[in-house]
Structures are given as structure tokens and as C-alpha cells.
Image (cartoon, helix red, strand yellow):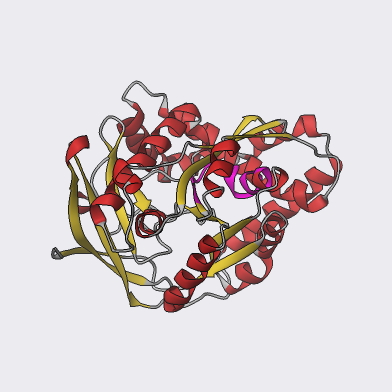
Amino acid sequence: MRLSWFAKSRKPPSAATFHTEIIADVPVPERAEDVRFFSRKLVRPGRVRRYSNQDLRESAMALFYLVVAASMPVRWWASICDRMSRLRLKRHVRKQFPAYAAATRAVLGGGLDARKLFEALLAARHRRRLQLAAHLTGFRWAPTIRLDGQDGLQAALLRGHGAIVWCDQFTSQTILGKRALHEAGVEAHQVSVNSHGVSESMFGLRFLNWPLVKVENRYLKSRIVFERDDAYQVTIRIQKILKSNGVVLMTNTIHAGSTFTEVAIGESGWTHLASAPANFAARGKAALFAMSTFETIPFREYRAVISPELLPAEAEMGRDGAKDMVLQARYILLKRDRLLEALKLFPDQMLTWSRNGRMTEASADAMTDDDAGS
């Protein structure tokens, strides 16, 4: 049942405006939980800026890390990133830390040292930039990348219906997660957005984003660019890949599609999960997996983890292609469980946190910005 709308996502005049509406609260009786489904409709298209203030900073940072990757010993890289993360620390603490602290404590508990975690995240973001620079320079860096859970993925592919790998937005997932799959012989297709990268300006799309896309594409069989005005064609392409027993990667980016979900997580937190992966799994026969990639030793060791198959009991009894929101909700809860496990392991490497309250209880402009980590 469609419920009344409650808010519009308000952004600067250059950005698009969206109408956010509750579709339904879907109960999952055996879990004694509800999953809330939202629609997100475009109200006013945004105006693409020629450049933004962020573009200058990102350009300077990219050049700096290219020099570091090309000339500095790998053993120095982590300490350089730590120092760089402190350059604008006071500003980050003033603008971002209060909401971050509230969200992380709601999920992981009030005894958490949120300030320490926040500073570690800032350093991890800089290491993410240097990971890209290291791949662009193309020499001297040979980290150990371990992939766990590949056997379950390969077993699912033997059934012949393809697989969806639902990726979390940890700092190393963007490149190292794809590289882990590629080096294990998994040919994956990435669902992405046109603005994937660090900037949405004309300058950023042309000069800042393409190096990341170019590096990622080394480890992909193809990239499926998602646009709102051709969602149907994208859906058809994904279905064809799954029917040919392919592997499709989807990142948990709730702003790309037209629907998403909200579900409780941790002690008193709420998180937002994309609905598309659960929808594809519920309406077809493709297997669904969660994936997280962690940096266990900075610039030395990485661990990519594919979960056991996310498979509600109802899915084993067969799926007829009809839209089953209860089955989707069960997939969402299984994904939430895996996300919480990953957050407890490496919370300092999670790029995006939702909030400590429900979206309907927040102000209209409180929507957390989403890093397009696909």
C-alpha cells in the first residue's frame, strides 16, 4: 500500500531534487522486524556545474599521491596518509563528526571511541586515493590480496542462473574488491552510474573520474552504466547477463535507483540498503551474495570476503518472477546481518553511515550523502 510522502531531498540549486515517499512497511514475522520500502522520484533535474570547489582539492590531492606512489617507498605510504588526513582535521570534526559519532554509536554502542574511529576513517580515505595512484603508476606495489568465500560463489554458478554480488562501501572495495575477483578468475559485470568517482561537475567527469573508472575496468568484464531514463534497458541487460550465468556486481548505493529500503541495525541505528539486488534475486533464480573488502595491513594485505549465499527459506521453494516484497524484505535482512558483521570488524573503513534515527524523523536535508563506490 502506498503511503503519503514525507520529504523532499533538498540539495544545492545545482543538484537534482527528489521526492521521497514511503511505499510500504513489510513485516517479516519470523524475525519480528519490518523493512520499510521507499520510492525516490526525480522532481527537478540538476544543473551540471562546470567545476566545483572540491575539484581543485581533489586535483591537487591526485597529483600529490601520484608523486608519492611513483617516488616514495611503500613503507612510508601509510604514515604519509595519516599526516595528510590531519591537515583539515578541525574542519572535518566541526562539520562531519557530530553526525558520524551519533550514527556509529547507535550501531556499535555508546562505549565506542567515535573520535578515534573518525580520525582512522579520514586516514583510510587518503589511503584509498593512494591505492588509485599506485595502480596508475603501475609498478613497485604488489600487495597480498586474499579472497574468502569463492567456493560458495562457484557452487552457485554451477546451477547456471548467474549470481549477484552485493558490495559494501568499504574504502578498499572500489578497486581491491574487483581486483580480488579478477585475480581469482571471476569475470564480473559492474552496475555503475555515469558520475561514478569523486566529482559530478563537468570538469570532474572529464578529468577526475576517468582514472578511477579506467583502473576498475581492468578487473571487469564490462560496466553497466545506470541512468534513470533508461532503467528498463539496464534491467534487461542485467537479466541477460544473469541468464547467461554471469556475475553482476552491485554496490549498496541507494541514490542511483528509484527505490531503496530502511532497516534497523545494531543497538539502535538505522541503515539504508538498495532494493535492486534483493529485487533481482527475489524475482529470478540468480544467487545473491554479500561482499566486503578490508585493508588488514595498510598497503600490504587486503582481504575480500564473499558471504555464504543469502538464501531465505522461501526462495528454495521456487520463485515465479512475480514481485514479492516479503521475500525481498527477507533478503534485505540477511544482507543487513552481513553488513553488521563487517562493520564490527573494520568500522573505520566504512565510507557511508546512515543515521541514528529513522529518515521520517529527520529534517528534509539530513539525508546522508552517498559515496558512489561502485
Q: Is residue 171 magenta?
A: yes
The residue sitting at the top extreme is: 111
Q: Is residue 281 magenta?
A: no
Give, as a single range, the part of the protein colored magenta.
164-180
Q: Residue at x 52, y 60 (%)?
A: 242
The image quarter in which residue 203 lies: bottom right
How many numbered discs? 0
Query: Residue 119, percent across and down?
Result: 52, 33
From the viewer's perspective, is 169 left or right of 181? Answer: left
139 and 334: which is toward the camera = 334
Quadrant of the frame with the N terminus: bottom left
Residue 317 in sight here: yes
Query: Residue 250, percent across and down?
Result: 50, 55
Query: Residue 204, percent across and down?
Result: 61, 67
User: Is 239 drawn above or below residue 230 in the view shown?
Assistant: above
Quadrant of the frame with the C terminus: bottom right
